[in-house]
Amino acid sequence: MYISTQYLKATGAVDVVDYLDVRDWEQIVIKPGAERTRVYQLPSWCLDRLDGKVDWLHGAFSFQEMERSVAAAYLTGAKKLGCTGAWLMSSIEGHKPGAGGQAAPVRFADLESALEPELRCSGDMARPLSGCYASVHEASRLFARV
């Protein structure tokens, strides 16, 4: 998370709320950026401290690093905050079993199930990304609130 936070800050394209700045807050109130899109870089254990509305969730291969229950709680939390869309990228079958100490791999189907029925797949992004890094073992999909 540190690297992605520093990258986003360096681009100057978004207003980044760093976990280090809010980690001791009892409640994290979500507010829009004044002049730019605001991005909250937060670990899953902060979700229950969030108050407000979010419009977008982006997950780039992070959910496959979590336990299924943690990934599901994260996605459920995003739905409760009013998330209207998401872009998820992840391994289709999850990590190799046991990698990272997981009890079971988190498959892309697990992520889709956690988003439904509120958010449904609205597009497959694998083709546009195929020239970059996508492979037949990975999925990149957009989801929209129905």
Image (cartoon, rainbow, N blue to C red):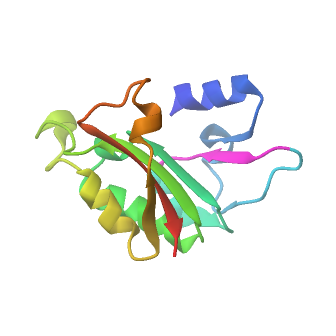
Q: Which residues are magenta?
A: 36-43
Q: Residue at x 60, y 71 (%)?
A: 82
Instruction: Using the image as rendered, state which of residue 64 and residue 27 is in the foreground.
Output: 64
Give the tally of numbered discs. 0
Q: Residue furthest front?
A: 127
Question: Residue 116's spot in the image, x, y percent?
Answer: 38, 72
The answer to which quarter of the image holds residue 121 is: bottom left
Query: In the visual, does 103 lie left or right of 132?
Result: left
Query: In the visual, does 62 lie left or right of 53?
Result: left
Residue 102 highlighted magenta (yes or no): no
Instruction: Using the image as rendered, state which of residue 122 and residue 10 is in the foreground.
Output: 122
Q: Residue at x 41, y 37 (%)?
A: 127
Q: Residue furthest left?
A: 97
The answer to which quarter of the image holds residue 76 is: bottom left
Q: Residue furthest right?
A: 35
Instruction: Using the image as rendered, state which of residue 107 and residue 2 is in the foreground.
Output: 107
Query: In the visual, does 103 lie left or right of 14?
Result: left
Instruction: Using the image as rendered, state which of residue 17 and residue 13 is in the foreground.
Output: 13
Question: Residue 102's spot in the image, x, y percent?
Answer: 18, 44
In the depicted structure, whether residue 133 falls above or below residue 127? above
Q: Residue at x 63, y 25 (%)?
A: 6
Q: Residue at x 25, y 58 (%)?
A: 109
Question: Residue 115's spot in the image, x, y percent?
Answer: 40, 67
Question: Residue 58's spot in the image, x, y percent?
Answer: 52, 48
